Image: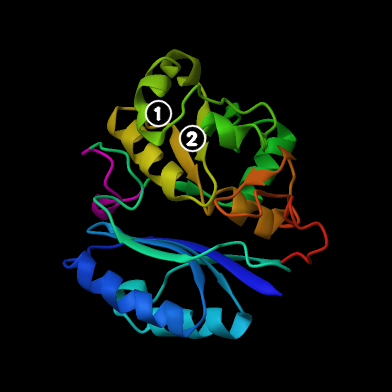
Amino acid sequence: MYTSIAAYCFVPVDDPQALADAIEPVARDHALLGSVLVAREGLNLFLAGGRAGIDGFLAWLRRDARFAGIEVKSSHSQRQPFARLRVKVKREIIAFRREDASPLEGRAPTVAPEVLARWLQQGHDDGGRRVVMLDTRNREEVAYGTFAGALTLPIDNFTDLPDAVAAQRDRLADATVVSFCTGGIRCEKAALWMRAQGMDNVLQLDGGILGYFERVGGAGYEGRCFVFDERVALDPELVALADPEVDAA
């Protein structure tokens, strides 16, 4: 049984290459495969391995005060979902290329999965406003599943989102808009950018779809969630499309 983790942390990193050089041998020593991206804005990782290896790596990572509070989403599979380990330094841990969307300067307000599930069930937020779920993922990911009635965008890359959102701005003006993505990293930047454009009615789903699945299941969600490994997609029980016999996390 393999444990897969997805995690990110926006935090200043003065020397991304030094951090990458430190992470790679530790991940290898713990027999982990997957991808790790390091940038001046923080760390983004998708890793899989034995439970002991995952725990050992996270214990090492959290000894660094910058990552002591990093939140991790976990799932399980009977096969290793990654073919190799890649640790890279990038300009951004998720490319957006917008100066007014830096999580290092603040964070957009969030909505907890439990609260969102209640809003979706009752058809409005606690103030009576309609709720629009804004999917910040690309077309390929959306095809596997999304929240029922979500506003999806005709984009192939996250960097295309600003123009696509601008075309929908009037449609969103009178709603509480909940930005969401796979694990939270894209919707965090998207929500920040939208609020910087004056859209102060935008929130982000805390923990993304995977966090929602972990905490409340699939209430209001249709289909599966695309993931970035050989499992292809996970259902609300965190069971893989390509590995139907696994147990949920």
Q: Secondary structure at mark 1?
A: helix
Q: Amino acid at mark 1?
A: Leu
Label 2, residues with CA under 10 Å away: few <14, some 14-19, many ≥20: many
Which SS does the magenta portion mostly show?
Answer: loop
- Above or below residue 191? Residue 16 is below
Give the CA distance from mark 1 to mark 2: 7 Å
Residue 16 placement (x, y as % from top left): 22, 65
**Marks 1 & 2, CB-CB < 8 Å contact:** yes
Residue 125 is left or right of residue 25, and the answer is: right
The magenta segment: 99-107
Q: Quadrant of residue 230?
A: bottom right
Q: Label 1, on which residue?
A: 161
| Quadrant containing the N terminus in the rendered view | bottom right
Residue 170 placement (x, y as % from top left): 44, 13
Q: Label 2, on which residue?
A: 136
Q: Residue furthest front?
A: 83
Residue at 40% x, 82% y: name it.
Answer: 26
